[in-house]
Image: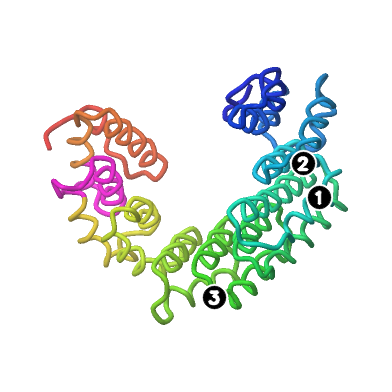
Amino acid sequence: MTVGAELSLDAALLDATSLDPRSRERGIQNIAPALLGELKRPGPSWRAAHDHARGSEALEALRRVLEHDARLENRGWALVGLGRLGDPEVRGPAMRSIAASGEGAATVFQRECAALYLSFLGSAARGAGQDATVASVRAALVEGLGSEHDDVRFQAAVALAEVGGEDVEARLVAALVHEHEDRVRANIVCALALSDPPGPIAVGALRGIVAGDPVCAEVAYEAALALAGARHPDAIPQLVIALRRRDLRDRALEALAVFDCVQARAAVDPVRSLAWGWQTGGVTRVRAAYALARWIPDEGNKLLRWLRFHPKFAVRGAVEEAAALLVRHGSRDDRIDEGGDA
């Protein structure tokens, strides 16, 4: 079994035929991860079932669900499993599913699973050098970016980024320009951020988002995170704004820490307030202290030494991680490990 597989392959195959709906769904969900676990592969993996003694049985079980199961949710899970196993033989049903009409929850879920199937299949094919399949999947995902359904456009953006290709950034930026649904816009920005770092085309579009007229806070936030990945200082004002929100500030602190003290000078005081604030959560304080240690080593390391004795294990673990990162950047004070006065 692999991480994510709740059942052995034997149990998953058995439960996939159960009359109990919950057991049946769990069995369907676990066939692919259990098989990949026995092969010791993380997946997705091209035609992985062909390398396992019970692979044909696993494929037959998932394909049977896809063709005959009355529940659309189970058909969706079967598509996801077949994608993880790199099975190219069900692209036809996947394309029919992704084009299905209707806005019911089960139909939406099936469309999203079909997009995930294409993402997994494309990634597996790319790893195996199956260029024709990669090209076919990419074409389907590009078409998905123009779907009438928000859920398909949402999934297609990240799926296309994961499958990859020379013109992915240009395709995503073009989709971003025409997209009006905030949730989808935010996910397209997340897809652009998967490039490490984002290229010139993506950076130009992201700068336009953070510097333009007021937009959805989540879209601007994701754009700022992506710009931070490109080490572009235009990200900083939006990241400082994000520090005001508990649900956004941790990732914002991590992103701000990549900039030097001169670039991040507008962030120093807000980060300092979080770092020394008694109402700030412990792990958040560590992240803020880490950023300060990058910018003002004496102050940041002083707080990290003090937080090393925090009563919560998670906070102490976060201090150890921060100290290890500081070693890489040459900002670490060895006294973090030795304790010392705060």
Q: Which residue is mark 3?
A: 180
- Look at the numbered disc 3 and give the secondary structure of its residue: loop
- The residue mark sitting in front, 3 or 1, is 1
Q: Which residue is mark 1?
A: 93
Locate the C terminus and report the quarter of the image it occupies: top left
Residue 177: x percent and y percent?
A: 59, 77
- Picture quadrant of residue 22: top right
* Residue 72 relative to residue 277: left or right: right
What residue is shown at x 35% (from left), y 63% (from top)? 239
Mark 2 Cα shell of 10 Å, populated few (<14), some (14-19), many (≥20): many
Which of 125/66 is in front?
66
- Look at the numbered disc 2 and give the secondary structure of its residue: helix
The magenta segment: 275-301
The disc, 3 or 2, on the residue closer to the chain's N-terminal end is: 2
Residue 124: x percent and y percent?
A: 76, 42
Residue 21: x percent and y percent?
A: 61, 32
Residue 69: x percent and y percent?
A: 74, 39
Q: Which residue is mark 2?
A: 66
User: How many angstroms separate mark 1 from mark 2 (CA)?
Assistant: 8 Å
- Picture quadrant of residue 325: top left
Badges 1 and 2: C-beta atoms under 8 Å apart? yes
* Residue 117 relative to residue 154: left or right: right
The disc, 1 or 2, on the residue closer to the chain's N-terminal end is: 2
What residue is shown at x 82% (from left), y 57% (from top)? 135
Mark 3 Cα shell of 10 Å, populated few (<14), some (14-19), many (≥20): few
Q: Is residue 61 above or below residue 234?
A: above
Locate the N terminus and report the quarter of the image it occupies: top right
